Image: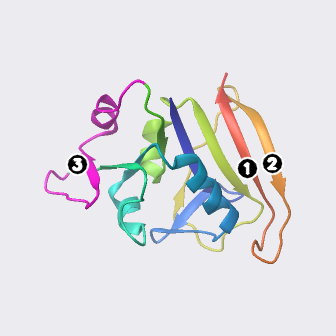
């Protein structure tokens, strides 16, 4: 089972200068709850953006075409195809970014777990690929209003392949 997980703004922006666009504590909690105990696959830049390196209690896999790349606490594979070949049948795999990895994984994914933020980031230089609604069907939507810790309203939206 391959799940893509991302937080997107109204224009499908996901990052700026290798950082998240928004800091939403509940989005981070959801990410941790869903991915802990499972496998996460990310690009090298996403790995480098993690404040403390490899995420604990998860199998960390990093994609890099540079054979000399080392990422402490993570396995490195040259392609998404190679990484997935090294995952077991029963393994729950989460694709956590960035944009290039999302584009490669979208045709292979079974589920999308998106946090849709009701705002436009002032700056975004990386975007999530377009979601084709003829392929992806919304399964659930959990809407949250803005509050003291969340400056914008947002929704946890899960999509499944039709």
Q: Which residue is mark 1?
A: 156
Q: Which residue is mark 3?
A: 65
Report the span colored magenta. 66-89
* Placement of the C terminus among the 4 image quadrants: top right
The reply, left or right, for residue 25 in relation to residue 143 is left
Number of the front mark, 3 or 2: 2
Q: Which residue is mark 2?
A: 142
Query: Can you name the residue that lies furthest to the right here?
Result: 145
- Residue 161: percent from left, percent from top: 63, 26
- Residue 25: percent from left, percent from top: 66, 68
Q: Are marks 3 and 1 in contact (CB under 8 Å)?
A: no
Q: State how many labels appear.
A: 3
Q: Earlier in the sequence, mark 3 or mark 1?
A: 3
The reply, left or right, for residue 17 in relation to residue 128 is left
**Which residue corresponds to the image point at 75% horizontal and 65% vertical from the top-left?**
119
Query: For the residues marked 3 and 2, what is the alpha-carbon distance in whole angstroms?
Result: 38 Å
Secondary structure beneath dot 2 equals strand
Residue 88's quadrant in the figure? top left
């Amino acid at each position: 089972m391959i799940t893509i997980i991302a937080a997107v703004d109204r224009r499908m922006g996901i990052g700026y200068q290798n950082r998240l666009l928004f800091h939403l504590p509940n989005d981070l909690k959801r990410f941790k709850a869903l991915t802990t105990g499972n496998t996460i696959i990310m690009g090298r830049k996403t790995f480098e953006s993690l404040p403390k390196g490899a995420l604990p209690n998860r199998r960390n896999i990093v994609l890099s075409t540079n054979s000399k790349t080392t990422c402490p606490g993570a396995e490195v594979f040259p392609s998404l195809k190679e990484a997935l070949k090294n995952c077991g049948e029963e393994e729950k795999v989460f694709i956590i970014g960035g944009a290039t990895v999302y584009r490669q994984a979208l045709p292979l994914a079974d589920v999308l777990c998106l946090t849709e933020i009701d705002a436009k980031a002032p700056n975004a230089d990386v975007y999530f690929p377009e979601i084709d609604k003829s392929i992806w069907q919304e399964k659930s939507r959990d809407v949250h209003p803005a509050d003291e810790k969340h400056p914008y309203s947002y929704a946890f939206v899960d999509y499944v392949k039709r």
